[in-house]
Each structure stands twice: as C-alpha cells, then as structure tokens.
Amino acid sequence: MTRVAINGPLPKNIGTGFAEIQEWEFSATWHPVIPAWFGRHFADAAWAPTQLLVFLVESGLQETLKIREAIIAFATQKDVWLPESRDQACSVIGKFTQGSKADEKG
C-alpha cells in the first residue's frame, strides 16, 4: 500500500484503499438519514474506503468531494495471511471482529 497526496477531487481510477476526506457536500435529493450518517463519519473519522467514495460520487449522492490524501493498493489482495501460531492468529481475527455479534445469545 502506498500513501499519496491528492488535495483535490477523488480521482476516477483511485483503486482500492482508504482516503482522507477534506470537504464534502451531499445531494439534497436523498433521504436525510444517509447524509447525516456518512457526514458524521466523515467529520469524526475523516477516512473512508475508496470504493465507498467512488460509489457515492457515481450514484450522485455526493455533489462535491475533496480528498486530502489516500492510502491505496496497486494490486488486488487475494490472499489472507495469518501467523502460524494459533494464539496469534486468534488474536488477529479477534481484533478484526471486536464488537461484532455472531448471534443474539444473551
């Protein structure tokens, strides 16, 4: 993965990765919950997956979107690597699934 400065609109061929959102404006034609949720995430976290941003722009949900920088991959990741140690592998998987619920057993 490579970090690149953009300081402008989202490039058309951005690839897979994450982008830091600098400025955004949502279309007024969408239900207000969608811009409220994404807008809060953009304000709080500032980073979002590039493919989500591409979808928002192409679908017309975003009227304007300015990116500060991006972390992108030039190759598609097809393999998943886990440590040989079961304890370490379980820790990695646990970190990525932290806070999720497999089912509603109370």
Image (cartoon, rainbow, N blue to C red):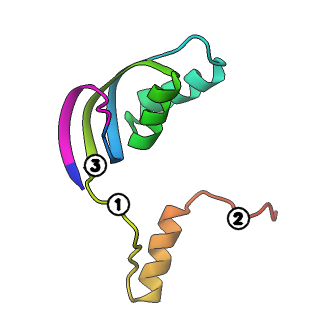
Three-letter amino acid code at disc 3? Ile
Check the image and report above or below for 14 versus 75.
above
Secondary structure at numbered mark 3: strand
Q: Residues within 10 Å of mark 2 (few under 14, many from 20)?
A: few
Camera-side mark, 2 or 1: 1
| Total residue callouts | 3
Q: Earlier in the sequence, mark 2 or mark 1?
A: 1
Q: Which residue is mark 2?
A: 102
Q: Which mark is residue 76?
A: 1
Q: Which residue is mark 3?
A: 72
Residue range highlighted in magenta: 3-12
On the image, the x and y values in percent for residue 28 come to: 57, 10
Mark pair 2, 1: CA separation: 28 Å
On the image, the x and y values in percent for residue 73 come to: 28, 54
Check the image and report above or below for 99 versus 4.
below
The residue at 35%/44% (across/down) is 18
> Residue farthest to the top?
28
Camera-side mark, 1 or 3: 1
Q: Residues within 10 Å of mark 3 (few under 14, many from 20)?
A: some
Q: Earlier in the sequence, mark 3 or mark 2?
A: 3
**Quarter placement of the N terminus:** bottom left
